[in-house]
Image (cartoon, grey):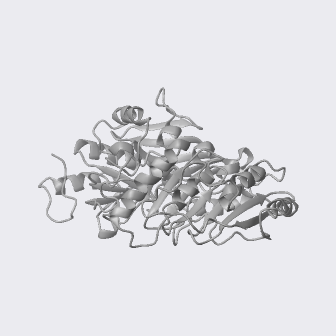
Amino acid sequence: MGVTDATGTGGPPEAPEAMEALRATGAVIRDAAPGDAVAGVAPRWVASPRDTGEVAALMRVSAARDLAVVPAGDRTKLDWGNPPERCDLLLDTRGLTFGDGLVVEHSAGDLVARVSAGLALGTLNSMLAGSRQELALDGVPRAGTVGGTVGGTLATATAGPRRFRYGTARDLLIGVTVVLADGTVARSGGAVVKNVAGYDLGKLFTGSYGTLGVITEATFRLHPVPADRRWAGVDLPAPRTGGTPGGQAYRPGGLPPGSDGFGRLDSLVTALASAQAEPSAIEIDWPGPRHDLTVAVLVEGVSAGARAEALRELMSAYGTAWLRTEAPEWWAAAPGEDTLLELRVPPACTHHALRVIAAYGLPARVRGSAASAVLRMSFPAGMDREAFTGLVTGVRAGLHPFGGGLTVLAAPPGLADGVDRWGPSSAQPLMRRIKERFDPGRRMSPGRFVGGI
């Protein structure tokens, strides 16, 4: 029997022995505190390993005693996904190094960096700045953060505005080192020492929410820091009406195209995406049903000012356009903290997604990539459970005709009870087989992912 009491009081008689075994790995072990909870589930212990070897030793001890392990970095997204079925050990990656104290190996001539998974994205780019290079990931900063750690960004597959030009973390990742549930250390991609035959570990572990193992190192392709940056934008009028208590108002073609800013959004985004000015990002911010919709672009590199001015002129045909040297205050930030949902639709269907949301008339704030059609939505505190459940179900049904989906990333305790946070996925059978291959004992973040994987 494993350690199942995660309350910090009492516990099975083998708990002291398990703790001593964990300490024997060399990692720093402490009792968990209330602030260590994972989506409301309290671990029993917190481990702070110093390198991949200590992570492997911790995993071997956990496997021998059937301890459930949840990896964590800066914890900016630890409340995302389903609460774990159980959590005995929270594995803090922030102290990880390569064994010789280094957290970055930078090959500036090759535009490549090997990075400790526990390093914060902001810290990494500060270290690369001296070489005028960067990892072109914006992360999704939350209050008081700079976007989380490298490992957390990979585990949650988060990407910010510049995904439009540079791609996501998965696209920039060229190598990864992971520790599997049984303590096996595996590497794939750049600087390969040992591969797990038949698997692209980088692609499997990116977006796995810690359910397959622990990411300890990653190797990324870098880009030069742009010489200049400019932002241009325009406000489009959003529909002031529409929205019913049940949110059943919107059907494709139900409103005349061009009757409001939503109707012109996709034509504007298409024009921006294909413009010779080559924006690095095309973002929207919609503060709510009674507010206009802002479309903003980022232009980077040589002649950024002139190229951004060309886009401002293009946008001026849609409204009063502006040009700035600083990012809008909402740029790259999540629209909210406590309740956060993510919508994905095919490109050119962004306005349909917004109309589906508008049909509910709820005070939703929507922000995200218009060109990539990945949007995040938040609500003020106090939303009741019935309204939330109806919204999730209804928006999923509304997005289905366009091939879109909705994920509940974060929700206050109780609000998402009974809600399938991930929604249906045709890839679920394959995901289950992969989980069984990598973690047959279900000890890695059990239940956090799609379908309770």
Q: In percent of the image, x 38 and y 57: which residue is there?
A: 390
Left or right of 319 in this view: 140: left
Where does the N terminus fall, quadrant-wise?
top left
Q: Quadrant of residue 425?
A: top left
Left or right of 391 in this view: 175: right
Left or right of 151 in this view: 441: left
Q: Quadrant of residue 79?
A: bottom left
Q: How many marks?
A: 0
Q: Position of residue 83 (x, y in %)?
A: 33, 55
Q: Nearer the viewer, residue 395 or 302?
A: 395
Q: Is residue 29 visible?
A: yes
Outermost residue, left side: 13
Q: Position of residue 329 (x, y in %)?
A: 64, 72
Q: Nearer the viewer, residue 380 or 19?
A: 380
Where does the C terminus fall, quadrant-wise?
top left
Outermost residue, top side: 198
Residue 172, compared with residue 87, is above or below; it is above
Q: Is residue 148 visible?
A: no
Q: Nearer the viewer, residue 308 or 225?
A: 308
Q: Quadrant of residue 41?
A: bottom left
Q: In percent of the image, x 35 and y 68: which residue is there?
A: 384
Q: Nearer the viewer, residue 140 or 351?
A: 351
Left or right of 31 in this view: 368: right
Q: In percent of the image, x 85 and y 58: which residue is there?
A: 307
Q: Position of residue 54 (x, y in %)?
A: 38, 49
Q: Position of residue 14 (x, y in %)?
A: 14, 52
